[in-house]
Amino acid sequence: MNKLEAISPIDGRYSKATKPLAKYFSEKALMKYRLNVEGEYLISLSEHPLIKTRDFSKQEKKLIRKLHKISNKDAELIKTIETENHGIKEINKGYKTNHDVKAIEYYMKHKLKETSLKDSLEWIHFALTSEDINNLAYGLMLSDGIENVIFPEAVEVYGRLEELARQYRIVPMLARSHGQPASPTTTGKEFKVFASRLERQFDQLASYEILAKLNGATGNYNAHHIAYPDVNWPDFTKSFIEKLSQKRMIKLKPNLITTQTEPHDTYAELFDNLKRLNNIIIDFNQDIWRYISDDWIKQKSGEEVGSSTMPHKVNPIDFENSEGNLGIANALLKYFSSKLPISRLQRDLSDSTVERNFGVALGHSLIGYKSTLRGLNKIMVDGEKVIKEIKKHPEIISEAIQTILRREGIQTPYEQLKELTRGKKITMKEMETFIEKLQISDKLKTELKQIKPENYTGIAGILATVEDPR
């Protein structure tokens, strides 16, 4: 299909940006992960001393482990087995299965029937329900997709914010609270705020664990236990799941107490983590948009067209694009978090179509991160502009003056400065006149007169480069 014909912009307009996720969240990828889980399960059965499978040779194990490395042609065959009357007699008598996981089982049998493993075909999917395979496959997809694509791209945004924090650590900037001029900060410190917030979400994400199950049709090992009552199936589950997620940043951990479906509470927690991460970047996008609007931050324009009718414009399109895509991602992530932990009785199938959209939410997230990073690589702070702006608001040093006067025991300094400054446009000359009229020592007057809007930034410059104590 031509990408211009795609319904979703993820596979159309933004396909270049989202292509890395296809390896983890396409339908072909889901097939690969299912095949991987089925194959490893078959091998684990063969290695258990109490289960009557024969031992597999190294070559046979290698053959099983190669099954998940499917081509597009292989994936199409699996899809055909599921959806079409295909005429391959040994596969469901040539009829479609109308069942995606059963199609995986039949595909494996079809591939192995002419090999030395032809005597072990009925051990494929032994005692399992589809959800045993699916929950492990989706857990691995999320683990790999986040670790290899989402996490690194978000870290790139973080890294650029840290660079800008260091670069502009001492450039003073007018702060605003409630939209009104407030005690000054530095441009670098404001970049650092967002970097610090992202770092906390990364720490949580990097140590995350997804719960998974392997306990049969209603979570009681009914089929497993009736076949092999002497096998400790919970221990088998623990060993299998932990081995399956070795060397991954986001681990899979066994949940032994479930219905047919793993409750997905850890999915909800994971998606909430990603939603918080996205919210932080949305918050940043909106702030940077305002700074660009105020001309405090400039964008390198290159040869881009800013407006179809106004030639002069250089719009903050990257940050706006990011905001929109992250908003879509968060709408989906929020729904995932509220929907997936709910399943009727021992299970219903309403989660299946939702899980197929994991890649959509992560795709919009990825587009958002890339857009913010692209915008960050174009910007520069206009130091002259921000200093000029901060000097327009001498009233912002009233906090400093009244604090020092309190230190010296002067009565009602807050009230005096409130009367001078509140709701008024004053000048530095008026501020100096106020200081001169105070009944204080000349030394203290000199100290107060040295306070300027552009140097009243506290330790913002230090905070901009400080290592986070977490």
Image (tube, rainbow, N blue to C red):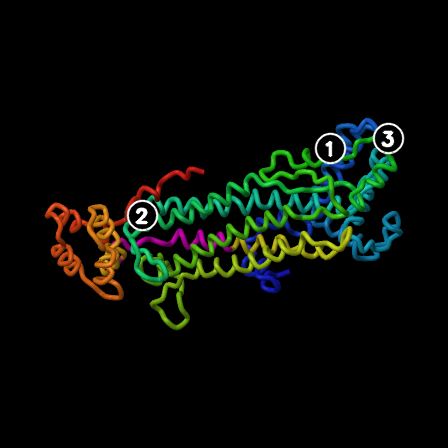
Is residue 114 visible to the viewer in this orientation of the structure? no
Magenta region's main secondary structure? helix
Circle 1 or circle 2, nearest the eye: 2
Where does the N terminus fall, quadrant-wise? bottom right
Where does the C terminus fall, quadrant-wise? top left
- The quarter of the picture where residue 10 lies is bottom right
- The quarter of the picture where residue 163 lies is top left
Name the kind of residue labelled 1 in the image. Answer: Lys
Q: Determine if the magenta segment contains residue 415.
A: no
Q: Which residue is mark 2?
A: 168
Would you call the spot at circle 3 few (<14 residues within 10 Å), some (14-19), or many (20 or more)? few
- At 48% across and 60% down in the image, what residue appears? 321
Whole-percent x and y of residue 97? 82, 53
**125 or 303, nearer to the observer:** 125
**219 or 314, nearer to the observer:** 219
Measure how far apart labels 3 and 1 are at the Cα level.
Answer: 20 Å
Would you call the spot at circle 2 few (<14 residues within 10 Å), some (14-19), or many (20 or more)? many
Instruction: Tell me where the magenta segment starts and ends, as one range.
Output: 368-385
Measure how far apart labels 1 and 2 are at the Cα level.
Answer: 55 Å
Q: Mark 1 and mark 3 in contact (Cβ < 8 Å)?
A: no
- The quarter of the picture where residue 462 lies is top left
The image's mark for residue 52 is: 3
Mark 1 and mark 2 lie on one chain; the one further toward the N terminus is 1
Is residue 220 visible to the viewer in this orientation of the structure? yes
- At 22% across and 63% down in the image, what residue appears? 419
Whole-percent x and y of residue 145? 60, 46
The image's mark for residue 62 is: 1
Assign a secondary structure to mark 2. loop
Mark 3 and mark 1 lie on one chain; the one further toward the N terminus is 3
Mark 3 and mark 2 lie on one chain; the one further toward the N terminus is 3
